[in-house]
Image (spheres, rainbow, N blue to C red):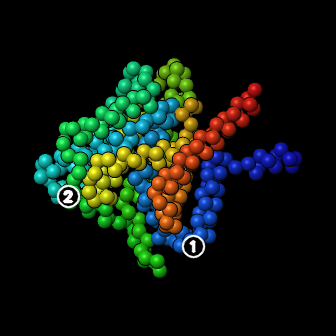
């Protein structure tokens, strides 16, 4: 075996590098605080990653089309707010928990499809559309209802924060898996099936690779945009409802600070808008890595503003890493 073959054999793929980074960072935190490796903490990372994870899975689908959407949390806000006000207005305080998530998901899906419509119909970059629509959704949420703070949420939402699927007693306390974590896993399966097992998924990848070529290949362009943005909106609406249910009260501007983590998860997960590239496995690793860092920085007493600094650095490193890889690939093709 010559040296070239050995290098090829030892070369890690992008997801392998992310997995290695996850293990190394976990090891560093474990040295600082051994309880990091406890089952309680591992389950906590999964539970805490659910909200951002669901949003990131939705964002991933849109990014693969070659667009970036910055209205994720605004869609989550208007979806959750509208659903809560509907329940309060109908005096349906004890209504089913999962019906609330369904309603919020439908509202979010419609908002996402509006973004997709303007992006496709008027050929406007998705990031521009989303910036404008984010302001519209935020304003509608408050102006039409006149309420920005709700202390007592419907009983179904309050019950959701206490729902557990798995509870395992350990020496450090109970290790739990929440319903939110299961919903996160469900979003992973949904996006994986869409992108890898359907013709629409192939079209979404083709759209990100070359929009003109995708149209010439016969893909239904309005359907691709409606599906990609609709799935994003659906997941954002569900995530928005989850966010306020877990917080047990509604403060409109709280969720607006969460956009960066969702974007960071997709970028660090290897989604490249320019070429329509990205894998569900890579994005899941990106989400879990950010969840690992956030969760364990909190455990060792690092303040929230410093945690945001770390996430910002992760975004810059991820973008730089992707740019270097693209540059190397471009040189090989010459």
Give the Cα distance between marks 2 and 1.
39 Å
Counting the numbered discs, the total is: 2
Q: Which mark is residue 175?
A: none
Q: Secondary structure at mark 2?
A: loop
Residue 103, relative to residue 140: is it above or below? below
Q: What percent of the width, then of the height, locates residue 145?
A: 19, 42
Q: Is residue 7 left or right of residue 218?
A: right
Q: Is residue 284 left or right of residue 228?
A: right
Q: What percent of the width, then of the height, locates residue 253?
A: 32, 47
- In the rendered image, the residue lying farthest to the right is 2
Decide if residue 259 is in sight here: yes
> Does label 2 or label 1 sit earlier along the sequence?
1
Q: What percent of the width, then of the height, locates residue 263?
A: 48, 43
- In the rendered image, the residue lying farthest to the bottom is 171
Decide if residue 295 is in sight here: no
Quadrant showing the C terminus: top right
Q: Is residue 18 left or right of residue 45?
A: right
Q: At x 64% / y 60%, what residue is drawn?
A: 24
Which of the 4 image quarters holds residue 247?
Answer: bottom left
Q: Which residue is mark 2?
A: 152
Q: At x 43% / y 42%, what residue is drawn?
A: 58
Q: What percent of the width, then of the height, locates residue 115?
A: 36, 31
Q: At x 42% / y 37%, what residue is drawn?
A: 70
Disc 1 crowd rating (10 Å Cα; few below 14, some 14-19, many 20+) is: few
The foreground one among 310 and 323 is 310
Q: Which residue is mark 1?
A: 34
Residue 214, relative to residue 81: is it above or below? above
Disc 2 crowd rating (10 Å Cα; few below 14, some 14-19, many 20+) is: few
């Amino acid at each position: 075996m010559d040296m070239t073959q050995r290098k090829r054999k030892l070369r890690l793929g992008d997801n392998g590098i992310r997995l290695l980074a996850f293990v190394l960072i976990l090891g560093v935190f474990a040295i600082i605080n051994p309880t990091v490796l406890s089952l309680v903490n591992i389950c906590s990372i999964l539970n805490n990653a659910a909200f951002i994870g669901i949003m990131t899975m939705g964002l991933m689908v849109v990014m693969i089309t070659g667009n970036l959407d910055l209205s994720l949390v605004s869609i989550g806000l208007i979806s959750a707010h509208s659903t809560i006000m509907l329940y309060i207005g109908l005096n349906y305080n004890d209504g089913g928990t999962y019906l609330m998530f369904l309603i919020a998901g439908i509202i979010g899906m419609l908002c996402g499809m509006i973004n997709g419509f303007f992006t496709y119909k008027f050929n406007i970059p998705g990031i521009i559309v989303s910036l404008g629509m984010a302001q519209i959704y935020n304003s509608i949420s408050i102006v039409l209802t006149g309420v920005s703070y709700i202390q007592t949420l419907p009983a179904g939402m309050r019950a959701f924060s206490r729902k557990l699927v798995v509870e395992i007693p350990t020496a450090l306390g109970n290790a739990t898996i929440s319903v939110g974590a299961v919903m996160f896993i469900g979003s992973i399966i949904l996006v994986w099936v869409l992108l890898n097992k359907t013709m629409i998924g192939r079209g979404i990848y083709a759209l990100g690779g070359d929009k003109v070529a995708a149209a010439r290949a016969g893909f239904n362009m309005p359907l691709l945009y409606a599906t990609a943005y609709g799935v994003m909106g659906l997941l954002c609406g569900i995530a928005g409802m989850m966010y306020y249910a877990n917080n047990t009260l509604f403060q409109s501007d709280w969720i607006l600070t969460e956009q960066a983590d969702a974007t960071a998860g997709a970028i660090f997960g290897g989604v490249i808008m320019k070429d329509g590239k990205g894998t569900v496995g890579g994005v899941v690793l990106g989400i879990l890595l950010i969840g690992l860092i956030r969760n364990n920085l909190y455990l060792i007493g690092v303040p929230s503003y410093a945690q945001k600094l770390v996430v910002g650095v992760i975004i810059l490193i991820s973008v730089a890493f992707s740019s270097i890889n693209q540059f190397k690939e471009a040189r090989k093709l010459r």
